[in-house]
Image (cartoon, rainbow, N blue to C red):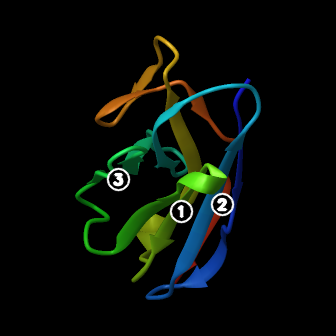
C-alpha cells in the first residue's frame, strides 16, 4: 500500500512563497507520475500540477502557470511544489497525488491517479 506524507503547508502573506513536499513509501511500486491537486472550502477539487517520473515532463493548471513549479527527487520518491507569488485564491488544502503502474485510478486533471495523501493546508492572507 502506497503511503504519501505531505509537508510544508502553512500561513503566508499574499505575494509570499511556500514549498510543499510529498514523499511516497510503502510496498513495491513503480511511480509513473506524481503531482498535486487542491480543494478550497465549498469548491470542487482542482488539478494543480504534475510531473512524469521518467522524463520529468510537467503539466500545470492555467491558474498557477508561471507562479508554481513542480519538481521531483527520484532517489527519495519525493515530489515538490514551489509556490511563488501566492494569492488569496490559492488558499486550499493541497493533496499529493501518485500514479503507479497499477491498473485503474481516478481521473484528476489530465490523467488518472491511484493514491493521494491526507492533504496540507495552505492559507494565503491579504
The residue sitting at 54% across, 24% down in the picture is 114
Q: Circle 3 sits in a helix, a strand or a loop, which is it?
A: loop
Tell me the distance, in whole angstroms, between the alpha carbons under discs 2 and 3. Answer: 26 Å
Q: Residue at label 2?
A: 121
First of labels 2, 1 by sequence position: 1
- The image quadrant that residue 45 belongs to is top left
How packed mark 1 is, by other alpha carbons closer than 10 Å (few <14, some 14-19, many 20 or more), is many
Residue 58's disc is none
Instruction: State the quadrant of the N terminus.
Output: top right
Residue 80's disc is 1
Question: Picture coordinates of residue 24 (x, y %)?
Answer: 67, 43
The residue sitting at 51% across, 44% down in the picture is 42
Q: Nearer the viewer, mark 3 or mark 1?
A: 3
Tell me the distance, in whole angstroms, between the alpha carbons under discs 3 and 1. Answer: 12 Å
Q: Is residue 10 positioned above or below 51 on the image? A: below
How packed mark 3 is, by other alpha carbons closer than 10 Å (few <14, some 14-19, many 20 or more), is some
Residues at discs 2 and 1 in contact (Cβ within 8 Å): no
Question: Picture coordinates of residue 46 (x, y %)?
Answer: 40, 45
The residue sitting at 33% across, 30% down in the picture is 111
Most extreme residue toward the top is 103
- The image quadrant that residue 75 belongs to is bottom right
Q: Nearer the viewer, mark 2 or mark 3?
A: 3
How packed mark 2 is, by other alpha carbons closer than 10 Å (few <14, some 14-19, many 20 or more), is some
Residues at discs 3 and 1 in contact (Cβ within 8 Å): no
Q: Residue at label 3?
A: 56
Q: Is residue 48 positioned above or below 24 on the image? A: below
- The image quadrant that residue 67 belongs to is bottom left
First of labels 2, 3 by sequence position: 3
First of labels 3, 1 by sequence position: 3
Q: Circle 1 sits in a helix, a strand or a loop, which is it?
A: strand
Front residue of 75 and 59: 75
Tell me the distance, in whole angstroms, between the alpha carbons under discs 2 and 1. Answer: 15 Å
Amino acid at each position: 500500500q502506497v503511503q504519501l506524507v505531505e509537508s510544508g503547508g502553512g500561513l503566508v502573506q499574499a505575494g509570499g512563497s511556500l514549498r510543499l513536499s510529498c514523499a511516497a513509501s510503502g510496498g513495491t511500486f513503480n511511480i509513473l507520475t506524481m503531482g498535486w491537486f487542491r480543494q478550497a472550502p465549498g469548491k470542487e477539487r482542482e488539478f494543480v500540477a504534475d510531473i512524469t517520473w521518467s522524463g520529468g515532463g510537467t503539466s500545470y493548471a492555467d491558474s498557477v502557470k508561471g507562479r508554481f513549479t513542480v519538481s521531483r527527487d527520484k532517489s527519495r520518491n519525493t515530489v515538490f511544489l514551489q509556490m511563488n507569488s501566492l494569492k488569496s485564491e490559492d488558499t486550499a488544502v493541497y493533496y499529493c497525488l501518485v500514479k503507479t503502474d497499477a491498473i485503474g485510478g481516478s481521473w484528476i486533471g489530465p490523467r488518472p491517479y491511484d493514491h493521494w495523501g491526507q492533504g496540507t493546508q495552505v492559507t494565503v492572507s491579504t
